[in-house]
Amino acid sequence: MTGESGFAKEPTGAQAQLLHALVMRDLGCALRNRTVLMTIITVLGFCALMMPQFAGSAEELPFMGAFGYALVPLFSVLEVGGTIMLFAMAEERAHGTYEVMARAGATLPLLVASKLIAGIVLCVVISLVAALFSGMWNANLLEFAAVVAVGSVPFLLLAAGCGLLSRQEMRVNAFSFALVLLCIAPLLSAFVPAAGTVSMACPVAFLAGFGAQALGGSIESLHMSLWPLVANLVAWTVLSALWLRWCIRRAQTQESA
């Protein structure tokens, strides 16, 4: 049976099986996509080449160490998560993939949930590998993985919504630029103490602060504070979820028009 949005509804059990299949599909497509693969290679190559330089300068220039610790999770989530959630979602919508999947019984929220799960999985895996490539063997990798899994959610939700609204390349590029700026702000706080207060309002502040701490740095080195970052995560998760919900409804309206 098809709802007003034009996307079929399935029983809960069938949706769970379909969600699993969609996640496997998204992971497989991502790992076969040249753009995603080049993005992963870029992240890992940069970390392997540059992070030892940041670590070597940390004793004389402490802010370089703080910058490096925050860069690993931010760069991984921005590049890998942004590519999957923004560019891939926009491309699939522009090519009519969602309409085809709808005829197979997949609702748009289910397709978005699949992308989100696949994005979180890849962000965690690539962030862990990037940390190892950076020489951070003594880091608390289990804690780091948990931080990336939780801290990447607001960014991925925002990127998913942007992808749903983007059918033209210019709009994708505009959203991409805005998302990059959001990720740069916490990095600036390593160099400029006054930027710490501003960067704590960014949706990736929790990821930067707690990610740096899990890798061996500290939240204070980025001129941030613990509890405001926790509050930031909760607030941005709620706001990003509301944003994505609105984007899904708008996309459904466009599909049924």
Image (cartoon, rainbow, N blue to C red):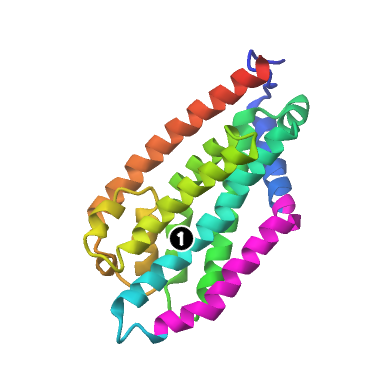
Count of marks placed on residues: 1
Residue nearest the viewer, comparing 178 with 231? 178
Above or below — where is 174 with respect to 226? Answer: above
Q: State whether the magenta stretch is mostly helix, strand or loop.
A: helix
Question: Is residue 152 visible from the viewing direction of this image?
Answer: no
The quarter in which the N terminus is drawn is top right
Q: Position of residue 21 (x, y in %)?
A: 72, 42
Residue nearest the viewer, comparing 115 with 186? 186
Magenta stretch encompasses residue 45? yes
Residue under pointer 1 = 74
Which residue type carries mark 1? Answer: Leu
Give me the residue at 46% from left, 70% from top: 141
Left or right: 71 in relation to 100: left
Question: Is residue 157 visible from the viewing direction of this image?
Answer: yes
Above or below — where is 169 with respect to 215? Answer: above
Above or below — where is 101 with respect to 38? Answer: above
Please state the extent of the stretch shown in magenta in the rendering. Answer: 28-55
Left or right: 190 in relation to 98: left
Give me the residue at 63% from left, 20% from top: 254
Tell me the crowding category of disc 1: few under 14, some 14 to 19, or many 20 or more residues within 10 angstroms, Cα based.
many
Give me the residue at 65% from left, 68% from top: 41
Give me the residue at 76% from left, 56% from top: 32
Q: Position of residue 239 (x, y in %)?
A: 38, 35
The quarter in which the C terminus is drawn is top right
Task: Identify the element where label 1 is drawn.
Answer: helix
Q: Which residue is situated farthest in the front direction here?
A: 170
Q: Position of residue 122 (x, y in %)?
A: 60, 57
